[in-house]
Each structure stands twice: as C-alpha cells, then as structure tokens.
Image (spheres, rainbow, N blue to C red):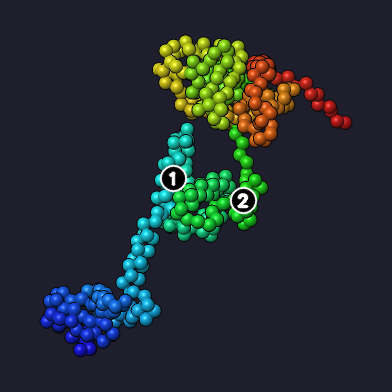
Amino acid sequence: MNLTDKQVQHLVKPGRYNAGITGLHLRVVSKEKKYWVLRYSLGNKRHDYGLGKYPDLKLAEARFKAVEANKLLSEGIDPITHKNKRLDAIKQECEKPLFKAFAIECVNKKKGEWRNKKHGDQWISTLNEYVFPLIGNKHLDEITTKDVLKILNPIWTTKTHTAQRVRGRIEWILGSATTQGLRDGVNPALWRGHLITVLPSPQKIAKTKHHASLPYQQIFEFMSELREMDHVSALALEFTILTATRTAETLGAKRSEIIDNIWTIPADRMKANKEQRIPLVQRALDIIEIAKSRDPNSEYIFSHNNKKYSNMAMLVLTRRMGYKITVHGFRSTFRTWTEEETTHPESVAKKALAHTIKDKVDEAYNRGDLLKKRMVMMDDWASFCSKPYKNNVLQLKTA
C-alpha cells in the first residue's frame, strides 16, 4: 500500500504500512501513536531505524530521510551508526567551553598570584568592555586572527596602552586553552611574528603620559608648606618625598620595619617583588617619632586609630594645597634632581627608586643595593629640600 497524507492521517488499525520508499513503513500502534521506521538488512542482520513520530514528521519528510539513509546503505554505511556519530559530534560541540566562561575561569585561577585585587578586576573590566561582546560566545577553537583584529583595530591607535593589555590578555587565555588541548595552531593574539606584521608598533604610536610632577627647583617651597600643616598625611607625604618611595610603600610602612635607621620594605609590598632597604635621613626619623605620638599604639607609621591611611590621602592633600601634581610624580622630581644637580651615578639613583634593571647582564653584575652610596645621596636630597634653590646660571644680555 503506497500511502498518501490523507491515509496516514486516518489510519488507526495497528500494523505496518508501506510508505513508497524501499524499507520505509508507518508503524501504527493506535490513532495517537504512529511511527516512521526504515527496515534494512546489513551484515546479515535486520535493523529497524526509527526516523520519527507522526505527525511531528510528515510523510514527505519521512520519505526524504529514508532516501538519505538508503544512500548511506549503498555505500556500506550503517545509518544508525552514522546518526549516533553525528549526535555525539553535536554533543561534544555543545559541551566545548565558550571563550567568556573559560576566560573568567582562567582569571579566577590566576588571582592567587596577584597581590592587588584591582588587577583581577581590571582584567575582567577590559574583557567585558572590548572582548566578550565580540567573541564571548564563540568556542575557543573558533577564534581567529580576524576576530582578534576586529577587537583591536578600533582601539589600537586611540587607546594604545589599553589595546596592548587587551591583546596580551587574549593571548594568555587562548594560550591556556591550547595547553589544555581545547584548541591548536598559532595563537591568533600572538604579537611576535604574527600581529606585528599587520599592526603598527605601539612604541611608535602610543602617547606617553607621565605622572604630573613638581619641578625640583620648587621643592623647598613645597616642603615648607607641608611642615606648616598639622596633619599626619602631610608627615606621610614629606616622608614619601624624602625616601623617594611609592604611596603604597609609605602608607603600608610598619614601625617594626625600621631597624638601625634602615627601613626594610618586604618583597610582597614592592612593585618588583624584591625586598628594598631604604636609608633614613634624620628628618625622616624625626617624622616617624612625630607620627608615633599621634597614634602611639598603631603598628603602622602613619595611621589614625590604628588604621593606615587611604591611598588617596596624600593626593587629596596636594589638591587642597593647590598643586596639580601626583604623589608618584615626586619620584620624577627626585630623579631629575639627581641628573641635573648632582654627580651621583645613575645606578645609585635607580637603586634608590627600586627600578628593575632590564638589561640581564647589568642585573647579573649589579646585585648589591649600594646602601652606603644611597645614604650619601639621600642626605644630599634632604639638604636640597630644606634650602631655597639657588640658580647660579647667569643670563647674558644681548645687545
């Protein structure tokens, strides 16, 4: 019996009905239960391949599926095995992690090695803004160089520093995926030998923004103003200037870190993650005693009610004084002074600022901290900060 749509609709008697395609028939269990089945033999075994339920699968659709299955059989392929493999492939594809979920997991794992919580927040923030909207819902092995360039091109010349960080973060996440066997091939965010060939060099297009600093010629007037202020944040800022340290290093300083006029900052509070010894001049030691009298029971040098000050305290103070400068900028003030007004070697000044030596050879030979030489230099700096600047250069009048 070669069925028609109308016949299929009205069949209620249980049985099997020929549907006009080799092996295809309609199996009727009841009026509500009708199933399309393809019966075939393969390897001396008979098989029933369920194609679907009627009316979810119409007659024409069942015939099309039967024809496709018969084509596979003509090639010696079992349609049931073929279907199962295809379903497994679809399942595996669905189970593969998407970039966004994998990236967040990677960042959470890496948080343990970051000393600053804000660093992890910055990763997620840049990924949320620039990356996830474009490739967040893509599988890791689907992401291409074209995708990465689509992210970077709009910000590469306008927000170069941010774009560099974004590129590096994508590279790291995709590199992690490769290591875990979730993708292979060239990392599409790789710079050397890859993106470097299509994007301009960041060093040539980035606009360098330096921390606003005070000219060293004005340091005496600034320090004089500070010493007239009756506030611990003023003491902390003066101490920061005299030691040429960073804000967090000063505000996190503990009294127990001062031994024999040497302040030892532990590695976990240093940007380069290396312990730093700071020779303290007499004025710095005096500041410590003054600050101690304000909060005697605190473990911190600069504190209020046993709690250290906010990182914004000193910056806010400079704003109230009417200066548009940053606290970090005083390190530039100090560095410029060493270059233009002294004969102290560059290596001594770099050690005082705890700058990382980029040249590995120089770093290998320069392992000491030059403490004695730095003590002389910091004494000179303290003396310079306490005296009005005298410009001995005479301007010759022209005729």
Of the residues shown, which amino acid type is indicated by label 2? Answer: Arg
Quarter of the image holding residue 331? Answer: top right
Q: Position of residue 33 (x, y in %)?
A: 16, 74
Q: Is residue 163 visible?
A: yes
Left or right of 273 on screen, residue 36: left
Q: Is residue 173 visible?
A: no
**Is 233 rendered above or below residue 72?**
above
**Residue at 56% of width from left, 28% of height from top?**
274
Q: Residues within 10 Å of mark 1 (few under 14, many from 20)?
A: some
Label 1 sits on residue: 106
Quarter of the image holding residue 41? Answer: bottom left
Look at the image and tell me in which quarter the C terminus lies: top right
Q: Position of residue 127 (x, y in %)?
A: 46, 48
| Along the line of sight, the residue nearer the viewer: 386 or 221 | 386
Look at the image and tell me in which quarter the N terminus lies: bottom left
Q: Earlier in the sequence, mark 1 or mark 2?
A: 1
Label 2 sits on residue: 192
| Along the line of sight, the residue nearer the viewer: 391 or 54 | 54
Tag on residue 6?
Answer: none
**Residue at 81% of width from left, 24% of height from top?**
394
**Residue at 50% of width from left, 28% of height from top?**
268
